[in-house]
Image (cartoon, helix red, strand yellow):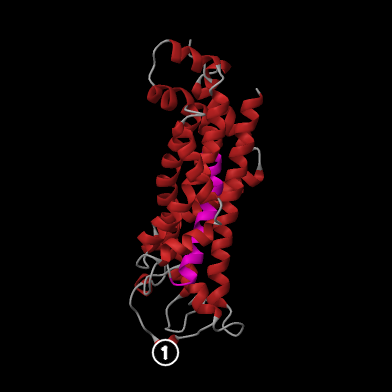
């Protein structure tokens, strides 16, 4: 008999979702995180409409208006080439959020699959190979490893995503491995094995659904960290290249003119802080929500 965690409760999915949203909406920090994340996504999608000077995201030079402080005409001031900083921040959100989504879209499925497979075949050669490879990657700080990989490739947005993906799958492999080794002892897994189900069915149809809650929570928390590492790569010139706007590059360029032209660095840095804070609040809310459900 297949007994999964969601089946034990006997509560319809629609009702569970309604209860979950009620608990979520009762937390002001949860709503704040959701609103912040939604606002960031909205600004990135509708950047051509929101940005007051959309053409400033490209190859534009206006030295007559260079180095202007924040004003009603330029909310975040202008840079050394006369481009509107606010418009460039809005457009930089596109590549920034895209990096978080793409990296996790690749790293999470791959890392989770590797962890579940290693956990299912615990004690075998497959387990040893995957866990040793994971340990090697985890032994190196993710930022250092991302810098090494990115430095070996041509500096652009795609290769920066690849460099971070190489470092990030291991965290999900370790998380999924721990859950899989625990699930191996569950009766429904033993029942599926005795009924003749293949390992692919057991891993992806029996184990995976019971691992989704912590994985989804970690994904939400990791978006901000991935974006920070992406900004660090851009800061040292290994990310998206000018004239395309990038938060890390804007901070790096503006740091040369601190403290007189503080707006060149402060506003892009505040944007990164808002991104990280919003997704961290959202991730904490999901973690609390899922942990509350597990206790029931």
At x 50%, y 58%, the residue is 227
Question: In this view of the protein, which residue sits in the foreground, 60 or 166?
Answer: 166
Q: Is mark 1 on a helix, strand or loop?
A: helix
Residue at screen point 58% across, 44% down = 283
- Which residue: 34% across, 73% down? 58
Specify the segment rendered in magenta. 216-237
Furthest-bottom residue in this view: 64
With respect to residue 214, does 47 lie above or below? below
Query: Which residue sits furthest front?
Result: 125
Q: Which of 30 and 123 is in front in this view?
A: 123
Q: Where is residue 186 in the image (x, y as percent from the top left)?
A: 56, 18
116 relative to 201, above or below: below
Q: Does the magenta stretch include residue 235?
A: yes
Identify the image quadrant of residue 244.
bottom left
Number of labels in the image equals: 1
Residue picked out by circle 1? 64
Q: Nearer the viewer, residue 283 or 21?
A: 283
Q: Looking at the image, can residue 178 be seen?
A: yes
Q: Where residue 269 sits: x, y (%)?
A: 56, 68
Reply yes or no: does residue 261 show up in magenta.
no
């Amino acid at each position: 008999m297949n007994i999964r965690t969601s089946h034990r409760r006997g509560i319809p999915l629609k009702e569970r979702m309604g209860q979950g949203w009620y608990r979520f909406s009762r937390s002001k920090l949860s709503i704040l995180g959701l609103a912040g994340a939604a606002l960031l996504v909205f600004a990135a999608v509708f950047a051509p409409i929101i940005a007051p000077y959309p053409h400033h995201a490209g190859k534009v030079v206006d030295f007559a208006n260079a180095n202007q402080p924040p004003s009603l005409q330029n909310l975040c001031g202008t840079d050394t080439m006369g481009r509107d900083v606010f418009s460039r921040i809005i457009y930089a959100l596109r590549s920034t959020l895209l990096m978080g989504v793409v990296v996790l879209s690749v790293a999470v499925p791959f890392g989770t699959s590797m962890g579940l497979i290693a956990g299912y075949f615990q004690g075998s050669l497959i387990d040893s190979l995957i866990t040793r490879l994971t340990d090697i990657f985890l032994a190196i700080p993710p930022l250092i490893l991302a810098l090494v990989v990115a430095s070996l490739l041509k500096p652009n947005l795609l290769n920066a995503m690849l460099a971070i993906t190489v470092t990030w799958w291991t965290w999900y492999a370790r998380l999924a491995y721990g859950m899989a080794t625990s699930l191996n002892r569950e009766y429904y897994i033993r029942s599926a094995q005795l009924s003749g189900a293949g390992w692919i069915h057991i891993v992806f149809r029996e184990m995976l659904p019971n691992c989704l809650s912590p994985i989804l929570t970690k994904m939400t928390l990791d978006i901000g960290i991935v974006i920070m590492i992406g900004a660090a790569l851009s800061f040292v010139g290994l990310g998206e290249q000018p004239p395309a706007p990038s938060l890390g590059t804007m901070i790096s360029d503006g740091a040369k003119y601190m403290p007189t032209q503080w707006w060149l660095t402060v506003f892009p840095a505040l944007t990164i802080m808002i991104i990280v804070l919003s997704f961290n609040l959202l991730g904490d809310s999901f973690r609390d929500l899922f942990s509350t459900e597990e206790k029931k």
